[in-house]
Image (cartoon, rainbow, N blue to C red):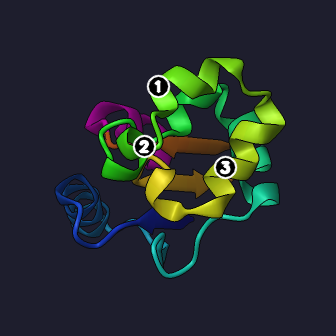
Amino acid sequence: MLFICYPKCSTCRKAKAWLDRNGIPYRLRDIKQENPTYDELVSWYRASGLPLRRFFNTSGTLYKSLSLKDKLPNMSEEEQLRLLASDGMLVKRPILAGEGFVLVGFRETEWEEKAK
C-alpha cells in the first residue's frame, strides 16, 4: 500500500501510528517532497468513488489564500486535478492507496474496513 502524508500533520501521524500498530505494511511518501502527479490523482479519484472536492485540503492556508472555495465550482474536473497536481499542500491527506481502494483522510473505522 502507498501511504501519502505530510509528516507535520497530526492526522497523518495518527494514521501512521494506526498502520504501525496494526502491522500493516506500506510505502511512505511525503506529499510535500513528492507531489502526486496528475495521472495518479485521476486514478485515485476514480478508484475512490468520492467527489473531487474531497481531495482538496480545505483547511490549508494555500487553499484559503487562493480563494478556492469560490473558484472550484466554476472549474472543470481536469482544471481541478491539474491544480491539485501543482502543489501537494492543496491535497487532503493522508491518502492510503491499496489494491482496489483509495482512502482520503483518516477515519479509523473506514481504514479498519479497507486496509486490514
In the image, 113 versus 35, the foreground residue is: 35
Percent coordinates x, y for residue 49 in the rendering = 67, 26
Amino acid type at circle 1 is: Lys
In the image, 61 versus 4, the foreground residue is: 61
Q: Mark 2 points at which residue?
A: 63
Disc 3/disc 2 C-alpha distance (Å): 11 Å
Provide the secondary structure element on which disc 3 rests.
helix
Q: Which residue appears at 50% of the width and 33% of the height?
A: 68
Disc 2/disc 1 C-alpha distance (Å): 8 Å
Q: Residues within 10 Å of mark 1 (few under 14, many from 20)?
A: few
Q: Is 71 colored magenta in this rendering?
A: no
Q: Is residue 36 above or below residue 97?
A: below
Q: How crowded is mark 3: few (under 14 residues within 10 Å), some or many (20 or more)?
A: some
Q: Is the magenta stretch mostly helix, strand or loop?
A: helix
Mark before the other along the chain sequence, 3 or 1: 1
Amino acid type at circle 2 is: Tyr
Residue 71 is left or right of residue 78, and the answer is left
Q: Is residue 33 above or below residue 114?
A: below
Span highlighted in magenta in the image: 107-116
Residue sticking out furthest to the bottom: 33
Q: Which mark is residue 13?
A: none
Q: Mark 1 points at which residue?
A: 69
Percent coordinates x, y for residue 114 in the rendering = 49, 40
Amino acid type at circle 3 is: Leu
